[in-house]
Image: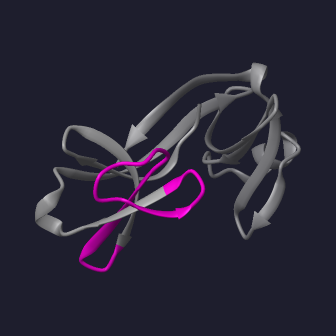
Amino acid sequence: MMRDGYVVTWQGREYDAAPDGDKVRIYATDPQEGFEEIKPGRYLRVLEPDEYDEIAYVRTLCTWRGEPFIVLAEADSWLRLEYTGGRAPVARRLGLEEFDYGVYQGWAPAHEVRDRYEHRV
């Protein structure tokens, strides 16, 4: 499992979320009271700041080949990783592509990835 995005705790449950000015949009995959279906299997509710308990940003972190990464995506048995070690020679040695200036990403077999955990900001 991997998560990379905002979450909100509302009524004792955690939801995927997106800040929207002073408000926050929360999403569910099943019908719930007060949620509007925006497409099949996707439901939306907009909350005021005083309606939810907590908002946080969740990232999935890991190590691959002994170096630190963020997990960006999953596809079958592969993970899209972004290198966070800050050393270009290491990124090149690992065969990563320079996605943007100083930002290195690549695909790694999921079975090679170690120490995967969620970090809340």
Q: Residue at x 54, y 37 (%)?
A: 61
Residue 98, placed above or below residue 89: below
Viewport quadrant of the N terminus: top right
Q: Residue at x 74, y 27 (%)?
A: 65
Taking 107 as reference, is 5 above or below it? Answer: below
Name the residue rendered at 30%, 80% in the picture: 21
The image's colouring method is one colour
Determine the image quadrant of residue 95: top right
Q: Position of residue 44 (x, y in %)?
A: 41, 62
Relative horizontal placement of residue 61, taking residue 55 as reference (left or right): right
Residue 36 colored in magenta in the image: yes
Could you say where residue 94 lies in the image, as x and y percent from the top left? 84, 39
Position of 98 relative to 83 (above/below): below
**Direction from residue 48 to residue 102 in the image, left or right:** right
Q: Give the image location of residue 100, x and y in percent.
A: 74, 69
Instruction: Tell which of 101 and 89 is nearer to you.
Output: 101
State the image coordinates of residue 31 (x, y, percent, origin top left).
42, 48
Q: Nearer the viewer, residue 5 or 36?
A: 36
Figure label count: 0
Confirm whether the magenta stretch covers residue 44: no
Instruction: Provide the residue span drawn in magenta.
Output: 20-42
Q: Residue furthest bottom?
A: 21
